[in-house]
Amino acid sequence: MDVIKQTSENFDFSDRMNFYLLTFGLLSAVVNFPEGYSNSYPNTSYKSFQRMINGSYIARGNEVRHLVAIIFPTHNLMSNKYSQFQKGISQEDYIWIWSAILNVWFLGYFFGTFLTPCLLENMGRKRTLLCSNVIALLGSMLSFLSVTISVPELFFVSRIVASISSGLSFGSLILFLQETSPTEYRGMTSFLSENTFTATTVMGIGFGMDTIFGKNLPVLTGISTIPAIISIIIVIPLRETPKYLLINRKNRKAAKESLKFYRGNTIDADAILDEMLLEIDDKVCSEGSILRSAMRVLRESHLRTPFFIGCLSLQIVAGIWPIIYLSTDIFSKHFTEQASQSASLLFITASFVAGMCGMFIIERFGRRTLMLWLGFFNIVSLMLFVVFEQLSSLFEPLKWGCIVAMTLFGITYGIGLGPIAFFITSELVAQQHRSLVQSMVFASWAFIPLFIVPSSLSMTYLFLNMPETAGREVHEIVQELLARTNKKQVQQLFGIQMKVCSTKIKSPIYFCGTGARKQGHNLK
């Protein structure tokens, strides 16, 4: 701490902020490394993981078969029971295992975000960030160990541990950056978090290529331990944020020292602290439970609106995750393995470069303008990808349009859509609600794209179109489905007015009368 303090005392405000922007940039990179890197290297190295998983079950199948043969030498049937593992697992089994390994990240992330508000309010931003970095180091070590000894189950556990750390670190990092930065630098420092995430994703996709570390899984996974250690070293000498000390801990003296630590002695600390005090919500009960606070967020409009804005903003960018995971596999339909890996690297590199440009335009154009326009072009890019992908079967050169569309998706995401979606919530709520609302948004995001939205759309369609089949003949059900396309014709044929079952308002048309069923037999 003394080293950083003595070095920074010689700087004026501008130089000091440049120094801390570099420090915060490095901090963001190493803190976001587990999430960006660990979720991107499977994109290009998935075949190496397939060989590792398959080889692990082959080896264990041989060992089990040999052990059974020793214990039961006369029972050939029991020994042959395990002979199937000598050929490895089936493609279907591998898909289930690999999908579980990839998608367990969201469950761990949800658990981490669930813990975030409790830790942030009780331990503070700095200590929560430090705790998440220690957990990230543990996850990185388990990941390295799992591929070294070829145990897929341990790799599964390592991703759970790493995702918990990411759930903790992402929310705490954004709050830490925003609460230590002046208003005019807030957008730029907030961009650092998402830009460094994209940068680590570039590293993951690049390092996962066969020409680099894609065929050397211990090196590929072991790299993540280095930034985990660096993140711990960086966080230790930093101070707690001045806003947390002032508003949450009500320690004005410590807040003033923290403010001067980050912004220098030339500032008017008292005036800045008085400005911060305006964020206090007098209606907040400090003794209230998390559940009560969450209910208040949903009940009061000025808190509920930011929550919905945060959830819907993240829903717009939810497509980035399957693309980060599977872009190489998606491109492989039309391109060679090496070309697909290169296309994935191009897409994520374009996103990173766009993000670097976005840091300098965020304050000029504003959040709302960028969010709406970039969101529109982001959706258009996905539509273009679908068009090019479908038409490429008719005219092969159109397959290159898939790469162009995916690159456009990465650019619109990186230049502003992705970063704004992740930090906008923290700019919409007061200090005392910030960690809770942001954690609620991130926790919701883990379930909205995976379960809630698809399930809601499915239930809506089923409610509107699914007929009752209990106690009915198949031909009656088919006739009902046909009747929905021309209700007037059916009424004329039946000679009756079709009725809707009273138990379902605005539900599909059901033939409730027995006469309708009898006449239905004669409908051709």
Image (cartoon, rainbow, N blue to C red):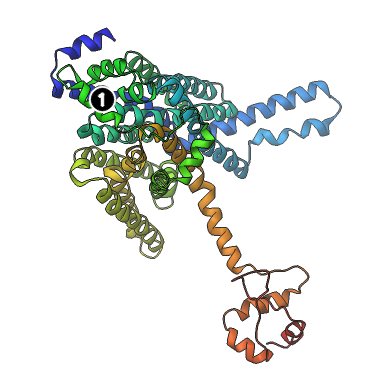
Question: Can residue 206 be seen in this snapshot?
Answer: no
In this picture, is 496 found above or below 158? Answer: below
Left/right of residue 73 with respect to residue 35 in the rendered view:
right
Question: Which three-letter amino acid code belongs to the residue tagged 1?
Answer: Leu
x then y, percent, for residue 171 = 40, 32
Residue visible at 51% across and 38% down in the picture: 106
**Residue found at the far front of this picture:** 282
Q: Which quadrant of the structure image shows residue 388?
A: bottom left
Left/right of residue 490 with respect to residue 399 in the rendered view:
right
Q: Give the camera-side residue of 133 and 152.
A: 133
Q: Which quadrant of the structure image shows residue 300?
A: top left
Left/right of residue 215 with respect to residue 274 in the rendered view:
right
Q: Which residue is mark 1?
A: 273
x then y, percent, for residue 130 = 41, 19
Q: Give the camera-side residue of 27 and 322.
A: 27
Binning the other alpha carbons within 10 Å of mark 1 as few (below 14), some (14 to 19) or many (20 upward) gives some
In this picture, is 402 found above or below 53? Answer: below
x then y, percent, for residue 163 = 48, 31
Q: Give the camera-side residue of 56 and 489.
A: 489
Left/right of residue 96 with respect to residue 144 in the rendered view:
right
Residue visible at 17% across and 43% down in the picture: 364
SS at badge 1: helix
In this picture, is 254 found above or below 489? Answer: above
Residue visible at 60% across and 64% down in the picture: 463
x then y, percent, for residue 8 = 19, 14
Residue visible at 48% across and 21% down in the picture: 135
Q: Give the camera-side residue of 196 and 183.
A: 183
Number of numbered markers = 1
Q: Quadrant of the N terminus?
A: top left
Q: Quadrant of the C terminus?
A: bottom right
